[in-house]
Amino acid sequence: KGAATVNNGIFSFSFVIPKDINYTFGLGKISYYAHDSQSVDAAGFYEKIVIGGTDDNAINDDEGPDVQVFMNDENFAFGGITNPNPVLFVQLEDDIGINVVGTSIGHDMTAILDENTSNTFVLNDFYEAALDDFRKGTVKYPLYQLPTGRHSIKVSAWDVANNIGEGFTEFVVAENATVALSHVLNYPNPFTTKTSFQFEHNLPAQVITIQIQIFTIAGKLVKTIQEEIFASGFRISDIEWDGTDDYGDKIARGVYLYKVKIAGDDIESGRVKGESDFEKLVILR
């Protein structure tokens, strides 16, 4: 599997033949599909390519793929929170390519949830190679109705030389119909000129309303940050603050408190809201 850029009707691609083929010489088939930005598509195939045998000068490779496992997107942090229906997101890379042929026993790309080997997910058909680069790609595999609590998931993948690579992550499914906030922090902290607020939540794939209120130690509100952000995954990490108050004046150095509030939609219960505990930040001038 691969994807290539088409320029004026011309394209090219390259790949390494996997070990998992029938070594008897015979005719193979290449299938093509293409589309443009206006969703006009085209399809075709070629059946006169001969495949078989072995190559005495084949690449000598004994290292498996690099496998990075996330939930929903690459911003996910190990041990973070999700809703009951997250998307397993995997990034893979290998110098000679990923094996998703699916024709040999034991070399499928798989995922195992909570060490339950009797219910293994086969990911071959969900792999998408990177554009113009057969050496890396991604997997997006939907999971459904996971029970509340902590879970683990391990992904195993093979390269075309049949070397294995594995990746692993843990995540916590928050209760449905309630907003969960976790790992609320700002970085850098302390800071002098600007800082970024970060947190995890369980309201992915929607526009969420975010409010961050910053208070003095005595409880006086000095700054309110209000934003609407489309949350593709379960982590927000790019809300910046330059250390000024609501009037644009620089706030004095010292210790301050802040609280994060978010609101979004839940399929079952409609509009939902949640807020964090108070966190500390320090301004240095």
Image (cartoon, helix red, strand yellow):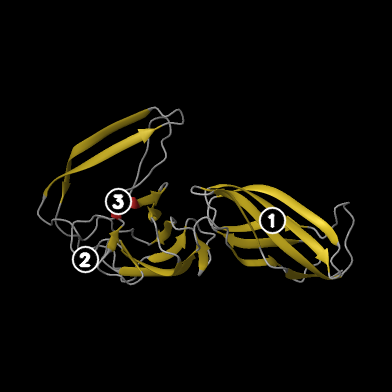
Above or below, 16 against 132 in this view is below
Query: Of marks 2 and 3, which one's residue comes earlier in the chain?
Result: 2
- The residue carrying mark 2 is 106
Drawn side of residue 279 relative to residue 264, left or right:
right
Neighbour tally class for label 2: few under 14, some 14-19, many 20 plus, Cα within 10 Å: few
Drawn side of residue 56 relative to residue 189, left or right:
left
Give the Cα separation between the discs numbered 2 and 3: 16 Å
Seen from the viewer's position, the closer of residues 20 and 190 is 190
User: Label for residue 125?
Assistant: 3
Seen from the viewer's position, the closer of residues 195 and 129 is 195
Q: Residue at x 29, y 64 (%)?
A: 59
Q: Amino acid at mark 1?
A: Ile
Element marked by disc 3: helix
Query: Of marks 1 and 3, which one's residue comes earlier in the chain?
Result: 3
Q: Residue at x 29, y 32 (%)?
A: 43
In x, y percent, where is residue 271? 59, 47
Residue 32 visible from this viewpoint:
yes
Give the Cα separation between the discs numbered 1 and 3: 36 Å
